[in-house]
Amino acid sequence: MDRKMEFLEDSPRVWGTRNVWAFSLSSLFSDWGHEMFTALLPGFLMGLGAPVIALGLTEGVSNFAQAWAALWGGRLNDRREGRHPALIIGYVLTGLKALAALVFWWPWLVLIRTVAWIGRGARGPIRDAYIAEEVPHQHLGKAYGLRESFDTAGALLGPLTAAILVAFVHPRMLIALTAIPAGITVLMILRVKKLPPRQPVRDSRTADPIEWPVRFRRYRVAVLLFASGYVAPTFFILRVWRSGITLGPVSSHTLALLLYTLHNAIYAAAAYPVGRLADRIPGRTILLIGYAVWTGAVLGFALNPNSLGVWVALFAATGLATAIIEVGQKMVTVGVALEPARGRGLGQIAAVTGLGQLVGSVLMGGLWSITNVQGAFAVEAALAFVGFLLMNWALSSRPPAPVS
């Protein structure tokens, strides 16, 4: 009888709610378009005559804007009032990236991508908080893992679509076609059930800053430093493309897109198992493993790989690390932040992540442009390693005893 009850408690009916499935399906189509756009971005920028630093600016500015929009989205979530319309508007804004097909001067691409990424940022904490409110905590890792697996299934389809069609369809037309999955995404998100507030609506601007524990503040700094060692996947694509490696009739450009597809395939396959694992072992352990794998992979890109097997291993490692970090960081944030301010906690971590990624992306593009690609990747690996050490210290330290 006890074993039967345990099975029922672990049943998808307990944690696979209507909203979890709606968010999962919307993530599938949203990331299909997003990753198709991302895979084409380096080649599209270079085709416009942009320098490598333009890729760093495009990634950095849009990720930074996304992160600060997430901070606003987190605060709005905790106010409760207006968060559901903001969720829908966020998905609509994300679809505007298809307008990049009209661009012939690269700074306009920065603007369009930034507006689209603001939509991604604003909706993220609200979506994650919706899931946390509906799903029992002991099954939260599975729910986050399911959504991440659908998200990365879309991320698999995006670059694969680009790799198959890029030889036959102009990249500009492929970018315009991202409007199709974006439209389906909006239809899916309209299926999300609005959740009633668990507490009275309040103005989150009056929140007392003393509510953030010391451990959370240390964790926030560690995330910021590690994110400075983040290398956008578009740099991995450009790295292979510029290496000139080919595979028979497959060009280096198409090979780079296929390797990025592998990156996302590993990410998709690992997300749900990592989520289940996160329900059984501490989120701190999950996150530190992800940080360690990512640091080693970025260092590998700095060592001038000269064989297809090494490229395959590095793209697989970055995909695995991304899945581990995405799930682990959400679990740690939800655990460290106080429940009444969970949305703001998720938003703050997203904000500092974006700030770190802005620094990392601009630094990566700048070093690549003025020195060499090996040095740029080596610096990013060093930053990620320092972030790993700081995170280990931040999450190992015991929280201070409450003052009576």
Image: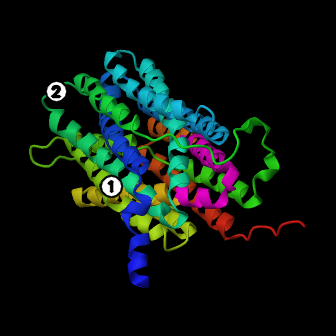
Magenta residues (range): 329-357
Q: Is 163 located above or below residue 227 in the figure?
A: above
Label 2 residue SS: loop
Q: Which amino acid does label 1 sit on?
A: Ala
Which amino acid type is marked by label 2?
Val
**Magenta-drawn stretch, dominant element (helix, strand or loop):** helix
Residue 386, disc: none
Q: Residue 124 placed where, x, y %? A: 51, 42
The percent position of residue 80, horizontal first and vertical second, equals 63, 38
Label 1 CA crowd tier, 10 Å (few <14, some 14–19, many 20+): many
Taking the spot 40% from the left edge, 24% from the top edge, the residue there is 96
Q: Mark 2 points at which residue?
A: 169
Quickly name the residue at label 1: 268
Q: Can I make out residue 38 in this image? A: no
Q: Is residue 92 above or below residue 211?
A: above
Gap between marks 2 and 1 measured at Cα: 27 Å
Residue 179: percent from left, percent from top:
30, 26
Q: Is residue 390 magenta?
A: no
Report the residue that reaches farthest toward the front.
Answer: 1
Callout 1: SS: helix
**In terms of depth relative to the viewer, which is nearer, 93 or 352?**
93
Left or right: residue 202 versus residue 160 is: right
Q: Which residue is drawn at 40% across and 72% down?
A: 8
